[in-house]
Amino acid sequence: MSISWVTVGTPLPSGPVRVAVTDLGVAAVSFAGETVTGVPGRVGLPDCADEARAQTVVARLADYFQGRSRAPGLPVDWRFTSGPHRVVLQTLLAEVPYGATITYGELARRSGVFDELTEVGGVAARAVGQMMGANPLALLVPCHRVVAADGLGGFGGGPLGIETKRWLLTLEGVLPATLDWNGPDPAVLP
């Protein structure tokens, strides 16, 4: 099954995203031209020639970024995830809705992946943090909703990763808009 890429302009501090698409759905999202762990590099991979598919990706992400929808609503191709990483990502997608957050440790506990550890806290929370950093499906599987017990935690997305995480959490109403907020008014979102 072939992979092709769609470039989507965004209001994110990190700039446009590149979205890897297949016949099954979105297989990866790349912020600011970063490579995605486990995903073949974009060199040599074509831009999406299926105009309808490309337009759907662009339109649904635009609706999300403008606050017209609470999720991109695109099918997910899980091919670049497996084992415990996939379980944790699927738990995140299923259990942490728009406008909510979860700590790394709580996501570790809910996933059930770390039940064999005698102390689920620190080790499991750090492992989940690494899994979020290697999430090939950012935006669709919303790793920006996973936070540290004492703050925002980390985020990919290049040198502006934390600002991107803050922007997404503001869009979803988790954080209050600041004077420099450049997104839709969170008070009037659906």
Image (tube, rainbow, N blue to C red):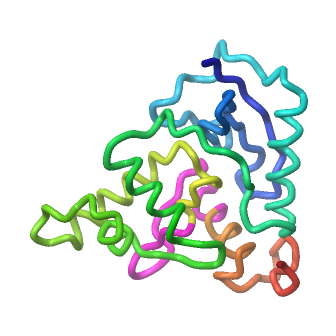
- Residue 117 figure quarter: bottom left
Q: Relative to the observer, which residue lies in front, 143 or 86?
A: 86
Please report the residue visible at 48 percent of the width from the left and 63 percent of the height from the top.
Answer: 92
Residue 109 in the figure: left or right of residue 72: left
Query: In the image, residue 107 lies at what x, y percent?
Result: 38, 69
- Residue 170 figure quarter: bottom right
Instruction: Check residue 130 for magenta coloring.
Output: no
Query: In the image, residue 139 lies at what x, y percent?
Result: 64, 55
Q: Relative to the observer, which residue lies in front, 90 or 38?
A: 90
Decide: is 60 above or below 17. below
Q: How many marks?
A: 0
Q: Which residues are magenta?
A: 145-164
Q: Quadrant of the N terminus?
A: top right
Q: Residue furthest top?
A: 44
Decide: is 160 above or below 4. below
Please report the residue visible at 37 percent of the width from the left and 48 percent of the height from the top.
Answer: 85
Please report the residue visible at 79 percent of the width from the left and 24 percent of the height from the top.
Answer: 48
Query: In the image, residue 140 lies at what x, y percent?
Result: 63, 53
Please report the residue visible at 37 percent of the width from the left and 53 percent of the height from the top.
Answer: 130
Residue 156 in the figure: left or right of residue 51: left
Q: Quadrant of the C terminus?
A: bottom right
Q: Relative to the observer, which residue lies in front, 14 or 175?
A: 175
Decide: is 177 above or below 44. below
